[in-house]
Image (cartoon, helix red, strand yellow):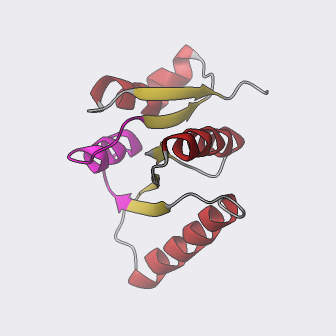
Amino acid sequence: MVCYEDTDVSKETLRLAQKYAKEWQVAIDVVCTYRREEPLAISEINDMEEAFQTQIKEQFIDINIKYHAHLLVDFYSAGEQLVKFSEGKDYEFIFIGISKRSKVGKLLFGSTAQYIILNAPYPVITVNGLGR
């Protein structure tokens, strides 16, 4: 499973997961979350889903790996959504990109990666996004 958002570190994380998936001959679940505060119209969700599917499809051009792209829309935090999604699945690892944040930033906004690392039912591989 790859935790994904439209950032360079997420794309780098997905490329690493693709490398391992090809080696192990397994499929990848690419999962993106959207935390909603208010109810969304079905058309809004459908538009978000279509844009996400297109974006992920582009990441698999010329790569012969099976994948499924999942957009989760809920009122739970990203970390909670991702951990709940992973429960009961048969994953080897969860891949997540991380970026450095100040202590104040973590305090104010929480840390999705930290939540996943502490609560995921599978080993978590983190990919550091410090300007490589």
Left or right side of 35 for 23: right
Horizontal and vertical percent position of residue 29: 44, 54
Q: Nearer the viewer, residue 13 or 109?
A: 13
Horizontal and vertical percent position of residue 4: 54, 48
| Quadrant showing the C terminus | top right
The answer to whether 130 is drawn above or below residue 103 in the figure is below
Q: Outermost residue, top direction? A: 103
User: Exactly how many numbered labels are in the figure?
Assistant: 0
Horizontal and vertical percent position of residue 76: 31, 49
Residue at 47 percent across and 79 percent down: it is: 46
Left or right side of 48 for 114: left
Horizontal and vertical percent position of residue 70: 43, 62
Q: Quadrant of residue 13?
A: top right
Q: Is residue 87 magenta?
A: yes
Q: Outermost residue, right direction? A: 132
| Quadrant showing the N terminus | top left
Q: Outermost residue, bottom direction? A: 43
Q: Nearer the viewer, residue 55 or 36?
A: 55
Residue at 56 percent across and 70 percent down: it is: 53
Q: Is residue 101 magenta?
A: no
The answer to whether 91 is drawn above or below residue 55 in the figure is above
Range of the magenta residues? 73-93
Residue at 48 percent across and 28 percent down: it is: 125
Residue at 78 percent across and 27 percent down: it is: 131
Q: Quadrant of residue 39?
A: bottom left
Q: Quadrant of residue 72?
A: bottom left
